Image: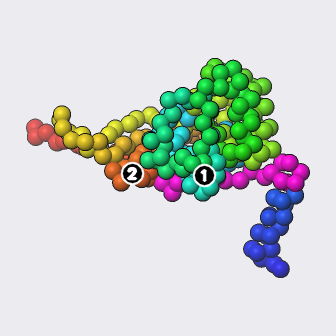
Amino acid sequence: MTGPSAALRIQELQQRVQVMQGSALSRSLPMLPGLSDLIRLRTGSTYAVDSPSLAMALMAGPSQAGEWTAVVGVPDFGLEAAEHLGVDLGRVVLVPRPGEHWLSVTAGLLDVAGLVLVKPPSPVSEHQAARLKSRMRQKDAALLSWGPWPRSEATLSVSSSTWDGVGHGHGRLAGRRVVVEVTQSGPTRAVPLWLPGADRQVRAAEPAVRAVVQVAG
């Protein structure tokens, strides 16, 4: 057996050995097609976000692919909004008010969920972050932090947001266009998205074009 099939087989065997040893190799989590230009979530890593709708969209891909997801410390988490963005509510574990036990609750949920969203009640210490990172690597899971996180793999921030379909005092909301700034390794990237569009799909948006008006001299 040679060529690509042999390489794939070797990779599969390596992953099985790592899992048996309790330290699974990092893997990419499934993402919605519309987020392909935004970021690729990998197990063993933490990603900081500042928007609930963006967090829901990132949860939707793994959820639709059969992964369990969990939400910790977000009592006002919008279940209807999450469902509209593609999250399978039948595979979501909610712990709205963990209080001072948020860290141990989050660590426990990483045992069963491939992706956990947590909103820490106070600034996270390096020690707390390191504890959860070790857990993620052992359990082959990833973490979304609603708010800053020490040494996060990337920070995703909604820098602008406009609604389509609203006129001067009339109309109805049809779609939300946002620009997400992604700070990872290298310069910050600005990625325009429909979150969601009028078709309720999360997808890439064309960059905004400024109208130029020429005034006769």
In front of the other: 115 or 130: 115
Looking at the rendered structure, the secondary structure element under dot 2 is loop
User: In the image, which residues are magenta?
Assistant: 18-36
Q: Name the residue under label 2.
A: 200
The percent coordinates of residue 186 (x first, y second) are 61, 41
At a point 51% along the width and 33% down the height, the residue shown is 77
In screen coordinates, is 107 left or right of 41? right
In screen coordinates, is 178 left or right of 14? left
Q: Name the residue under label 1.
A: 62
Q: Would you say the magenta stretch is mainly helix, strand or loop? A: loop
As drawn, which residue projects farthest toward the front? 90
For the residue marked with disc 2, what is the amino acid? Arg
Looking at the rendered structure, the secondary structure element under dot 1 is helix
Whether residue 189 is visible, yes or no, is no
The C terminus - image quarter: top left
The percent coordinates of residue 102 (x first, y second) are 68, 26
In front of the other: 135 or 25: 135
At a point 54% along the width and 28% down the height, the residue shown is 75
- Residue 140 within the segment the image draws in magenta: no
The N terminus - image quarter: bottom right
As drawn, which residue projects farthest toward the left? 217
Does 151 sit above or below residue 59?
A: above
